[in-house]
Amino acid sequence: MNLNLNNKYALVCGSTAGIGKATALALAEEGVQVTLIARNEDKLKATLTELPQHRNHDYIVADFSNPKELKEKVEAYIKENHGFHVLVNNTGGPKGGPVFSADVDEFEAAFTQHLKCNHVLAQAVVPFMKNEGFGRIINVISTSVKQPLDGLGVSNTIRGAVANWSKTLANELGQFGITVNNVLPGATGTDRLAEIIKNKSAKTGNTEEESANAMKSAVPAKRFAKPEELADAITFLASERASYINGINLPVDGGRTKSL
């Protein structure tokens, strides 16, 4: 299947590790010119060397705790270089814990890092997408928007807000050839999952291996996802082949989520 992504430009957030990095690699393999964005310049430089070198890939150093600075840096980049056909919003999740015991500042920090930053990035890239008559905004969220996950109170709350923002945006932008969709990872082999397993182990007294196996047993596929499997779904949604898929939440979780 030809995804018709050659000569497109993509901005991929959180692209030095995990799902973000796998997505950057997958898009680059399809001929996309990728701009990485994350806060660690050394990791950005290292990731850049791993991308196929037939396009002029690039990076932006930005911290998602500061939406104003993020907006300024991305807008300056677009003005000096080019716009983006594809935006992949992806950043690390809030720390775990019960929702009732969460500090108010935790909600504010997570809201800033996820919803506010997603919004300023969308505002920065949409004018170019409108001019091109083609745009893809893909938000990497969580299956918690369909089924809240125990012990991830702040994350459950903020992910739900992002999902509703995304659906509203899809309704507003669809007329311009721009789609907005959410990919919902289940348990995926990333540093974030390793942290969750470690916390579960500490809470239950089980070994980390036992905690991991218990999590796998809740998945019909009986294993964790590979970041590349999420990247494949994201890459398809970024393509012209997905032009009539808009405003959806797509779980990529091996069947773990029990709701339809």
Image (cartoon, rainbow, N blue to C red):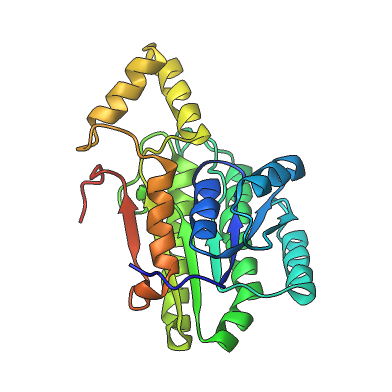
Q: Height in image: 40 above or below 119?
A: above
Q: In which quarter of the image is residue 208?
A: top left
- Residue at image position (42%, 70%) is 239
Where does residue 58 sit, x and y in percent of width and height?
A: 70, 58
- Residue at image position (51%, 77%) is 135
Q: Height in image: 201 above or below 13?
A: above
168 and 79: which is toward the camera: 79
Where does residue 108 sit, x and y in percent of width and height?
A: 62, 50
253 and 56: which is toward the camera: 56
Where does residue 145 sit, x and y in percent of width and height?
A: 37, 53
Q: Height in image: 9 above or below 44?
A: below
Quarter of the image with the N terminus in it: bottom left
Where does residue 213 sit, x and y in percent of width and height?
A: 30, 22
Tell me, yes or no, if residue 142 can be seen here: no
Quarter of the image with the C terminus in it: bottom left
- Residue at image position (75%, 72%) is 81
Q: In which quarter of the image is residue 244?
A: bottom left
Tell me, yes or no, if residue 59 can be seen here: yes
Relative side of 100 to 14, left or right:
left
